[in-house]
Amino acid sequence: MSSDSFRDKLESFENQFPDRDYKIEIVCPEFTSVCPKTGQPDFGTLVFEYTPGKLCVELKSLKMYLQSFRNEGIFYENITNTILDDFVAVVQPKWALLTAKFTPRGGISSIIKVEHSA
Amino acid sequence: MSSDSFRDKLESFENQFPDRDYKIEIVCPEFTSVCPKTGQPDFGTLVFEYTPGKLCVELKSLKMYLQSFRNEGIFYENITNTILDDFVAVVQPKWALLTAKFTPRGGISSIIKVEHSA
Amino acid sequence: MSSDSFRDKLESFENQFPDRDYKIEIVCPEFTSVCPKTGQPDFGTLVFEYTPGKLCVELKSLKMYLQSFRNEGIFYENITNTILDDFVAVVQPKWALLTAKFTPRGGISSIIKVEHSA
Amino acid sequence: MSSDSFRDKLESFENQFPDRDYKIEIVCPEFTSVCPKTGQPDFGTLVFEYTPGKLCVELKSLKMYLQSFRNEGIFYENITNTILDDFVAVVQPKWALLTAKFTPRGGISSIIKVEHSA
Amino acid sequence: MSSDSFRDKLESFENQFPDRDYKIEIVCPEFTSVCPKTGQPDFGTLVFEYTPGKLCVELKSLKMYLQSFRNEGIFYENITNTILDDFVAVVQPKWALLTAKFTPRGGISSIIKVEHSA
Amino acid sequence: MSSDSFRDKLESFENQFPDRDYKIEIVCPEFTSVCPKTGQPDFGTLVFEYTPGKLCVELKSLKMYLQSFRNEGIFYENITNTILDDFVAVVQPKWALLTAKFTPRGGISSIIKVEHSA
Amino acid sequence: MSSDSFRDKLESFENQFPDRDYKIEIVCPEFTSVCPKTGQPDFGTLVFEYTPGKLCVELKSLKMYLQSFRNEGIFYENITNTILDDFVAVVQPKWALLTAKFTPRGGISSIIKVEHSA
Amino acid sequence: MSSDSFRDKLESFENQFPDRDYKIEIVCPEFTSVCPKTGQPDFGTLVFEYTPGKLCVELKSLKMYLQSFRNEGIFYENITNTILDDFVAVVQPKWALLTAKFTPRGGISSIIKVEHSA
Amino acid sequence: MSSDSFRDKLESFENQFPDRDYKIEIVCPEFTSVCPKTGQPDFGTLVFEYTPGKLCVELKSLKMYLQSFRNEGIFYENITNTILDDFVAVVQPKWALLTAKFTPRGGISSIIKVEHSA
Amino acid sequence: MSSDSFRDKLESFENQFPDRDYKIEIVCPEFTSVCPKTGQPDFGTLVFEYTPGKLCVELKSLKMYLQSFRNEGIFYENITNTILDDFVAVVQPKWALLTAKFTPRGGISSIIKVEHSA
């Protein structure tokens, strides 16, 4: 899965409103990685939804972190679970849901949803 | 309904995150079979939603399995229930929902939803 | 409302999966009848949703049954309630919901939803 | 707000299925009144949803009633509350919800929802 | 965050129906401010949903208030929380939800939802 | 094809701007007739486009004329050509185009376009 | 048709780029008038397209001019031709096209296009 | 390519309006064949547009003819050219255009347009 | 209109394919300026289409140039003509078309198209 | 630009219908390369339209060819012109048009169209 060097790219900043539970949704339609079986590129849209605790994710670092997967061979299920794990480890949200929608392969498309509660 | 030789085409692989309940949705818009009454082809979109247990469905085997029905005479209700039964038997999900949307016949279209809880 | 001769056109067949609660949705966008007040034709889309008991509705007979209303003078509310009553009497579903959406008249359009629980 | 002469235009007819709780939705996209502050016309879509008791609203009378507001100076909040009050007084529904969507003014558009329970 | 001079622009008027809980939704698709980090303009749509208490927000004052942010350097999370705080302080609603949808930057777009209960 | 008694229902009124070539388009989404082969109802949308000469078609008479076909057995090609012929005979336009779009039968839908130049 | 007092409301301002042929399109979705036959309100969207000569139409005056028709009894064909005539008389464009789309009546909707060349 | 036994399924009927040039469009969204290289099924939508001469295509025979390709191994370019050739041979239109849109394979989709003039 | 200091922000780079006539389209949905009459902000989408000569427009400089108008009081017609003039002066295209679509004001929206040929 | 080793990946097969001018359109929504200035990935959709001469492009080789650009630093204008040049050199079409639509950067998106005639 994602090495520590990937996770290290993710940065956070201090949430100015830690006492209020509110929701942030971030849509990333330009995700791409490589299928470990066929060597062919995969494409997808990642949607992060989370309730921040003491930290918010820094958007530019999120973009750089996701670009780490560009030439990485990794399966759909592992992409989604690993990215949520990295996100939770760095941002420490009260709640988070990651939805990953991948483009069709062989006429079949996949959507994977992984949720975290603190 | 579907003979064992159909079900045998379905393959699974090990879920790397068995302790987390997450959801996988798979959209298959190219399903076709044959109406047993008229001999005319039927067309539909199958949507699988499931929470994996120890196994995930292998997508290419799912495609081959669904192609088994191409020249098979079978009614809408039986298609949907039989395919869910085969899916549950092989993948052993914690939960699964199969939605089958068939194209219009005589100005009337049908959607069938079958659910499984472990 | 609908005479017995209308209801007699509706046919059912045996549900092969009576022990599982599943849902069937049938969309009929070509319904037409006549307004009893103005004599003008009305047009609408009927959507049946139901959970079958021992029986499923036969689609061709449903089409013929709905065509019985083509030259019948009947109000929107009566159409929707009467058709659900006929459907329930013949198909004996565990649950059913009929939604009827009528096209605009005088700039105003109507949607009527009638539900049945066994 | 709406004078009695407005309310008097609303008519009802007898609900033939008073023992069944069902839902009627009526969409009126051609509502117009006048802003009391600027004298400029306002435009909106009114959506009535209700569960009838002993009475149903007569559609043509509803159209004529809504036309009463054509040259009336009245604010959005008052339109929505007053029309629901008139509707409830005449039709006596078990439940009713009125949603009023007004077109943009100064780049800002408004939607108001008012609900009634018997 | 927003100085008092911003908040002072927000005005209210008396709710004529204070005893009924109803919902007002206001869509403002022309919000713009400036990113404090890059100095580049940000663009977004703000959607206010609220249940009025004794007061309703006056729409023209809301427009003028939102224009105060036009040349203000402020982050997405602070925009959304600050504007809801100002709205609640002036309008004193029973309940309010502010949804802010910002246009894509670097291929990534954000939606922030902040809720208030009295 | 359409008897004279059908054509007699079509009425016209005097064009007040006969010296200017302008275009009128009329969309009729509620056309229905009967298939002469199967006896099953057909449904379609008729779109008239024309440049009036000395006459314009009267809309209510057009509606009544089209309703004449409700229980008439007639093929798609004949519907479209016959209705254009009737329209041209009564309204005597400088130019006319009739587009008829029929709903799917057996998974196949048809659009027929017939044009007239004076 | 439209009295001079209507036309007098239309104002123009000087085109700053009279030597270049360019095109202006103005969309007015809130037009309403009254049917002279039934007394019922009509609703439509007017789209002006024109190439300015020495003058451009002033938008607020266009809005006030169109509001003059609010309680005027006038047919679709006359609305479209009369408004184009007034527009041409006041703005004196090199070319103009007015498209008027009216909402459905009796299930039938109309679009009228009138063009002017200098 | 298509054997004569395929072409023999296509039937025509006499055009009742041979002196008028008009256009017929037929949309067939349920075409399927097999890729001769991979053995995998292909799916597409075929759109026929033609101006009939002395004959029109019979729709049910067109459906049966297209079903002949269901288990036939044939490339996209050959499907489109062969079907147009068969159509022209049997129906002898004044003009014909066949557009074939195939669903994505490997993230790439294809549309092929073949035209015939008499 | 736009001072020289605005135009100076626009930069170009050398077209590597000057012998081939090709077309570049650039969509800028985040344009904003100020109405000189009311002081209120205007919002619009600018679409540039052009055939490059020896130069192409540099996209980041175009963004900075358009931001110059953020707090500038200027009418729709002048915005569109002035920006095209600046674009032509700096980029010297073989052909260019600028389309500016402004959001509704008082229920009325405007689109202005200005074209240049070398 | 593209080295010969890129172009060498493109393959063709013999057109079976060289005497008929027909059109092939190929949509490739998963193109990605790298901006040579910022090092950031770019994303776009490439649409090829061409009339084949003696050859057709082989789709799998086209996919592999386009993947060559995945980690290549290259500007939009050069991508589009270079890919068309490679396509023309290998496939030798009678006519070809390449349309490349790139996703927004800094709120601005670009579309480039390059055409070739034999």
Image (spheres, coloured by chain):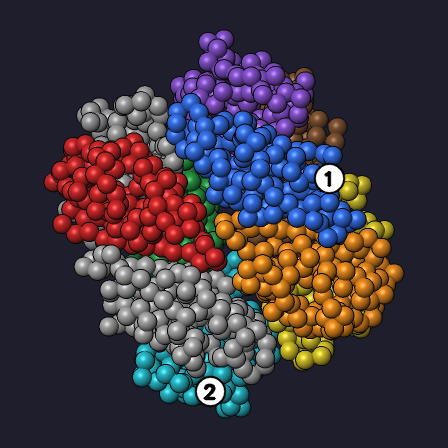
Chain colours: A green, C red, E cyan, F blue, G orange, H purple, I yellow, J brown
For disc 2, the marked residue is E12
Q: Is residue G37 left or right of residue E57?
A: right
In what element is the residue under mark 1? loop
> What amino acid type should be assigned to the residue bearing mark 2?
Ser
Assess disc 1: are there few (<14), some (14-19) or many (≥20) residues with their C-alpha within 10 Å of its C-alpha. some
Tag 1: amino acid: Lys
Q: Which residue is mark 1?
A: F94
Percent of width and height locating residue J99: 64, 42
Label 2 resides on the chain identified as E
Judging from the image, mark 1 belongs to the subunit labelled F
Instruction: Mark 1 and mark 2 in contact? Answer it, CB < 8 Å.
Output: no
Dot 2 falls on a residue whose secondary structure is strand
Note whether E17 is above or below H91 in the view shown.
Answer: below
Which quadrant holds the C terminus of chain A?
Answer: bottom left
Q: Nearer the viewer, residue E31 or G61?
A: G61
Tell me if residue F104 can be seen: no
Marks 1 and 2 belong to one chain = no
* G11 or H36, nearer to the observer: G11
Whether residue F51 is visible, yes or no, is yes
Q: Assess disc 2: are there few (<14), some (14-19) or many (≥20) residues with their C-alpha within 10 Å of its C-alpha.
A: some
Q: Residue furthest left?
A: C19
Q: Is residue E37 left or right of residue G95?
A: left
Name above or below for residue H53 compared with residue E113.
above
The residue at the point 29 percent across, 36 percent down is C65
Q: Residue at x 31, y 50 (%)?
A: C99
Residue A70 relative to residue I17: left or right: left
Picture residue at 19% right of the left edge, 44% below the top: C88
Q: Position of residue F21 (x, y in %)?
A: 76, 47
Residue F117 location, quadrant: top right
Nearest to viewer (mark 1 / mark 2): 1
